[in-house]
Amino acid sequence: MADVLTQMWREIAERPDGPMAFRFYLQPLMAMLFAVRDGIKDAHAGRPAYFWALFTDPAHRRERLREGWHAVGRIFLLAVVMDVIYQLTVLKGPRPLQGLLVAVVLALVPYVLLRGPVNRLARGLLHHRPRARGPGSPAR
């Protein structure tokens, strides 16, 4: 069992230096872009930080999970497909557990870790932004 785990971690560690290494930059970048977009939407809607709300708001947990999966589902599936291609071409065989682990690290982790802080930052910026005065508003 230890040999299997050692081989798995070695094969995973070799991926960023091997063929198709661009995905180790592109997929987290895409997940982060979606996290920024959704974090700003959360701030505008007054919703709590995403990851925190998954644990503290059970009434809306399923809705939030579905919303998050909708945002990064394609990136996750792309990560799985690209890892399967890598496995078949470089490793000469499928490694399903490795594919899922790599996809989680490349797509889901960056999204979950960034969406909440972006929400907090955007909420702080929205709260401190000076309001535009319309015609007829008293001058301060």
Image (cartoon, grey):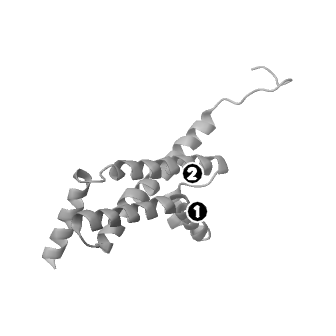
Q: Position of residue 23 (x, y in %)?
A: 36, 52
**Which one is earlier in the sequence, the residue at label 2 or at label 1?**
2
- Determine which quarter of the picture holds residue 8: bottom left
Q: Judging from the image, what secondary structure is the residue with disc 2 in?
A: helix
Q: Nearer the viewer, residue 43 or 72?
A: 72
**Along the line of sight, which residue is nearer the eye, 17 or 63?**
17
Asked if residue 120 is positioned above or below residue 112 in the image, the reply reads: above
Q: Quadrant of the C terminus?
A: top right
Q: Residue furthest right?
A: 136
Report the residue that reaches farthest toward the bottom.
Answer: 1
Q: Residues within 10 Å of mark 2 (few under 14, many from 20)?
A: many
Q: Which residue is mark 1?
A: 67
Q: Quadrant of residue 59?
A: bottom right
Residue 1, position as x, y percentages in the image: 16, 79
Q: Amino acid at mark 1?
A: Glu
Residue at the (19%, 72%) spot, across then down: 5
List the residue tagged with mark 2. 38
Residue under the image location 58 percent in, 43 percent down: 123
Q: Mark 2 near mark 1, Cβ–Cβ under 8 Å?
A: yes
**In the image, what residue type sits under mark 2?**
Asp
